[in-house]
Amino acid sequence: MIKPLYRMLISVLLCGLWLTGALQAWNEHYDAVQRHFETMVKERFDQIFDGIEDVAEWEKERAVIKRKLLKMLGHHRTWPVQPPDVRITSRVERPDYVLECIVFETAPGLFITANFYIPRKGSGPYPLIIYQSGHSPRGYYGNKNAFKHHGAWFAARGISCLILDTIELGELPVTHHGLYSYKWYDWFSRGYSPLAAELYNARRAIDYLVTRAEVDGQRIGATGISGGGVTTFFLTLIDDRIKAAAPVSGVCSTVGHIERRLAVEHCDCMYPVNSAGLLFSEMGALAAPRPFLLCNALSDGLFPQPYFEQLVDKMREIYRLYEASDNLRAATVPGGHADSESIRLPVYQFFLKEFLGLDTTLTEHGPVDTLKAEQLLCHGDGFPLNERLTRIHEEFMPGAVFTAERLTSEGREARLKELTHTLRSEVFPYFPESGVSFETKWGEQSNMWKRTMRTVSFSSFAELRVEGIYTVPEHLEQGRRLPALLVIRDRRRPSWWPDVNRQEGYDWGERAVLIIEHLDNDSRAIDDSLAHQMERQAMIAGQSFDGIRTYEVLRSLELLRSLPEVDPERITIAGSGAFGVNGLYGALLDGKVNRVVLESPTASHIEGPHYLGVLIHTDIPEVVCLMSDKVRLYGTVPVQIADALRNAVPGNTCLKNTLADCLK
């Protein structure tokens, strides 16, 4: 027993040493990615309002920002003409208010629960507050139960209030944490954020409430805390019916989210899928010049105070253009992240003044007449069997429709041109028009397999460097130009053993070959737990890891074309799985690549690669068909791609048996 135990201990120690080396490597690259996002976001933040000197200039920019924001949220589509269907499932009368339990069908099969507090004193129509609930679980009764004191307080003072359940913590729940907890990266590809769904439900609820005689449609406000705070923030930006708003403990600057690495603290409902690369400050300025009270607690680690102030100060630049600085207010109170009395009072004062003209100072909110949880339940008879809420992440965002019909050469060229423009402007707008200096670093030359090899690294974005191996035939005649092959290494399948996929050892023949390692792969790998949150952080900054990888492909092509022994007109890209598809998109955007070789590509961007919002515009089968004159495939070819090729490009010669066949 001693020898086997000894061997096991030695193996564990060696594995530990090997992992220690790996940790050093991923730490280095993690820091590089972090610096990249910090630099990019801070530069944008400092410049976002440059050149905007008056309201007219801002209104032009405002229209652009709002259009981009609406599109990212899927709210740019034609809005329903009719208000949603509703069922008032119960009604409770109290001395100061009447409570209605409402089930909204905001879209066919999309059922949302809410409590509507209607004042009994005074005469209507009454101002309306849309209260967006935060992340406070209350089980079967929905998280509206956690914030019922707000509805009762407002209604007792002559302001009607609708308290909405969130889709995650409502009576019929569906997760806000698909990406955060379950790594559903297809949310990136779809462009789906639960924030968009929460905003849709709130806006549809307003569509209904303005038809009620009790509601004054000219005095609509919004508030909420935490997740409800950020929803209030965005609701104000995209819906001009909101005349005054008070987001509580829900926002800070994008700079803060990146520098403090706050993605790990927040669920997916806190952010739109930021394909346009917008910052919280420029989006927040859409509220100007309406009354806007931003509230925060001094010790709230989720929204650090310095970055809360940074957000407010930047937004104030636009409020000043309207000579409405006083309309943008900030309230900070002691304590941490909580729905405390101290943080409620400035909100209550704000709406009393804005909607009732009462300029008063509150020191306490006093007694509040609230109901029991069971009185707030809306789905008293159970959930509808025709509900679609639990599939909302698959259905909410519009998706591109590709019908695999036979392509004419003219139709293909037109669609290629259109798609290339769309991808550059809508999916990869962060790709620089001109790249930074390569700052190429070459390693020592070595000879093996009758080839000359050197390691190489070069810049993609300023803070990020591509690592690779460059190999040419051992006896290369001076002045001769070779066809080139760009190989995208993928050690993620199976990835832990260092010698897997040693592509530099293949018999590449008379070719110059550059083998690159993508971001977060091979020697550039980041620890899984850190990489996951860093990918979410990339989205906050308006980028994606796979988008960055695609830009690395473009930079690699640029480097190859700069080498004297490479024929720039004869370059092939080869890769497998999702990484190979990055090469496909690199070739599409480049437009000059001679051939693309894909081994066992993914069938859809639902599987990867994950570019922000790409499925709104296209999917992998369409791109393969459009580039069928250049694409060769081998290995396991998904049926979706094979069928699309057969229908759209009959007689194509894309499917091959081996890599050698693909390179002929």
Image (cartoon, rainbow, N blue to C red):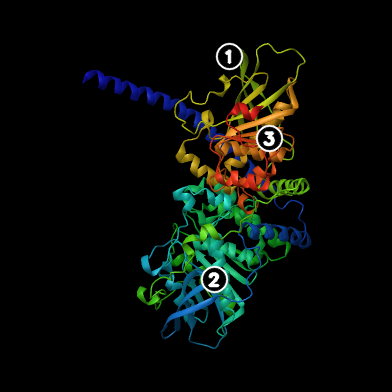
Front position in the image: 363 or 211: 211
Query: Which residue is the site of mark 2?
Result: 106
Residue under circle 1? 449
- The three-letter amino acid code for the residue at tag 3 is Leu
Residue in the image at 59% along x and 50% along y: 254
Picture coordinates of residue 184, whole percent (x, y): 49, 49
Q: Is residue 584 left or right of residue 567?
A: left
- Does residue 278 appear anywhere in the picture? yes
Q: Are marks 3 and 2 in contact (CB under 8 Å)?
A: no
Tell me if residue 250 can be seen: no
Q: Amino acid at mark 1?
A: Trp
Query: Which of the numbered marks, if any, corresponds to residue 340?
Result: none
Q: Looking at the image, which residue sits at the far front?
A: 651
Image quadrant occupied by the C terminus? top right
Of callouts 3 and 2, the N-terminal one = 2
From the image, tell me which residue sits under label 3: 554
| Image spot of residue 127 (x, y percent) | 57, 79
* Crowding near the residue tagged with mark 3, few <14, some 14–19, many ≥20 C-alpha atoms within 10 Å: many
Give the percent coordinates (x, y) of residue 611.
Answer: 60, 46
